[in-house]
Amino acid sequence: MKTSTFFAGLAVGSVAAAVTVLYSTPQSGSEMRSSVATASADMMAKLKDVKGRVNELKDSVSDFASENVQPAIEGVKDSVGGWRTADPGSRNRLESEIHEIQSAIEELERSVAAQQNN
């Protein structure tokens, strides 16, 4: 194949492709640039809106935490402090009941293990 024939075919193919693209494009260049600019402006507005909503959410969470979480923490601290200062009889009784519960759980675990071995 001659080089001139190859380049002639390449030129004809390129021209055919360019004509096909020009006639199949739904918008002209200026219309396309205009629609891209409009879409870009819309995306920037939406991004700004999302950023504002994220800041509102952050402020809302911060307000919720300061209004609700801190009082709950203080309440738990007060309860634990009250339990520590409870009269020794109540405290000893609670510790005894906890020990009995732990013993019952250990006995139950041994019983289940023995049944599984059989």
Image (cartoon, rainbow, N blue to C red):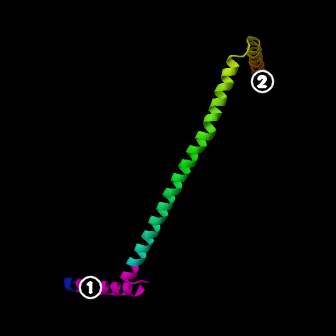
Q: CA distance from mark 2 to mark 1?
A: 88 Å
Instruction: Quadrant for residue 80, please give it.
Output: top right
Which residue: 62% across, 32% down? 73
Q: Count all numbered tags in the image, as a single digit.
A: 2
In the rendered image, the quadrant that contains the C terminus is top right
Give coordinates of residue 109: x percent, y percent.
75, 22
Amino acid type assigned to the residue bearing label 1 in the image: Ala
The vertical placement of 15 against 36, above or below, is below
What residue is pinned by disc 2?
112
Q: Is residue 106 magenta?
A: no
Q: Is 57 on the left or on the right of 84, as rendered?
A: left
Callout 1: SS: helix
What residue is rendered at 40% in x and 81% in y? 31
Q: To which residue does mark 1 refer?
A: 11
Residue at horizontal 43%, vertical 77%?
35
Q: Is residue 67 left or right of residue 58?
A: right
Residues packed near mark 1 inside 10 Å, few (<14), some (14 to 19) or many (20 plus) = few
Of mark 2 and mark 1, the one earlier in the sequence is 1
Q: In the image, is residue 52 above or below residue 83?
A: below
The boundaries of the magenta stretch are 5-32
Residue 114 badge = none
Q: Quadrant of residue 84?
A: top right
- Between 57 and 24, which is closer to the camera in this rendering? 57
Where in the figure is residue 49, as x and y percent of width and height? 50, 61
State which quarter of the image contains the N terminus. Answer: bottom left
Mark 2 lies on a secondary structure that is helix
Q: Position of residue 94 (x, y in %)?
A: 75, 17
